[in-house]
Amino acid sequence: MTRVRLKDAAEWMRIANLLLDGDARTRALARVELWVGVRAFVEHVARLPIGPLNDDPDAKADIAIRVIAKLEAHDYAHVREWRVRQQRAHGHASWWRFVKIVCAHVAIDYARTSRRMIAPRNQPFEWVDEQLKDPHLLEATVQVPFGFLERASELELCDYLERFTQARPDRDAVAESRAAQPVPSKPAPAVSLHVIRRRR
């Protein structure tokens, strides 16, 4: 697990002051600190309300970029508002609590666009897990001609996988079906199978 050192509130107030009031050089340096710190927090520290995407490094990296873009938007409007609240000591939150709130909003929007999320917009999340399966096992399970996966169109594959996910194969029948088929000349590559698993 990656160890991340998080800057404290005083350091982030300094960075915010440079971002908002500094000259071109100091603003650029502060922006680098913002990128490095926030990206490390999102990718290695934050636990977000996005189910299995929490364990997907590519998803976390995408979310980190979107969080930083949101913080930078409109000349750092959110950072400016955070600094005002800190200075007034009214309705204020620590820097990382503030960033976590932004992360949660961004992550939920991101998760709603994921191909693995199948719930309607106003419903709790439901996820599709991806599992690698031997394509010849799939052929035996739904009893399609040998070699189907190599020559099928995308539409035929979608229909085929949908039928497979609804099948409840008998293990002995699958074994007999596979034994009756010719042995392929080389191993077929694994294919990605979507299996619906409802997890909230």
Image (cartoon, rainbow, N blue to C red):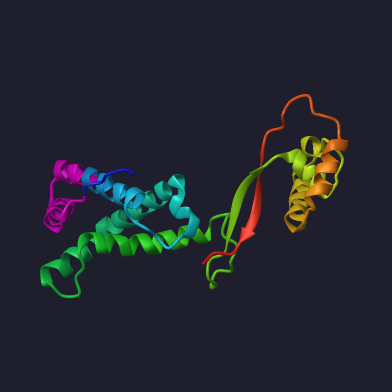
Q: Is residue 119 above or below residue 116?
A: below
Residue at 18% x, 46% y: name it.
30
**Image location of residue 51, percent across then percent down:** 48, 59
Residue at 43% x, 45% y: name it.
57
Q: Is residue 130 above or below residue 196?
A: above
Foreground pick, 139 / 118: 139
Residue at 87% x, 40% y: name it.
145
**Image location of residue 160, percent across then percent down:** 78, 49
Question: Quick one: quadrant of the N terminus?
Answer: top left
Residue 4 can be seen, yes or no = yes
Foreground pick, 152 / 5: 5
**Residue farthest toward the top in the current orientation of the protein:** 185
Magenta segment includes 54: no
**Image location of residue 24, percent across then percent down:** 17, 43
**Image location of residue 12, percent across then percent down:** 16, 54
Residue 78 can be seen, yes or no = no
Corner quadrant of residue 79: bottom left
Corner quadrant of residue 82: bottom left
Q: Exactly how many numbered labels are in the figure?
A: 0
Residue at 31% x, 43% y: name it.
2
Q: Main secondary structure of the magenta part?
A: helix
**Residue farthest toward the front in the current orientation of the protein:** 172
Corner quadrant of residue 182: top right
Foreground pick, 160 / 29: 160
First to last magenta residue range: 6-31
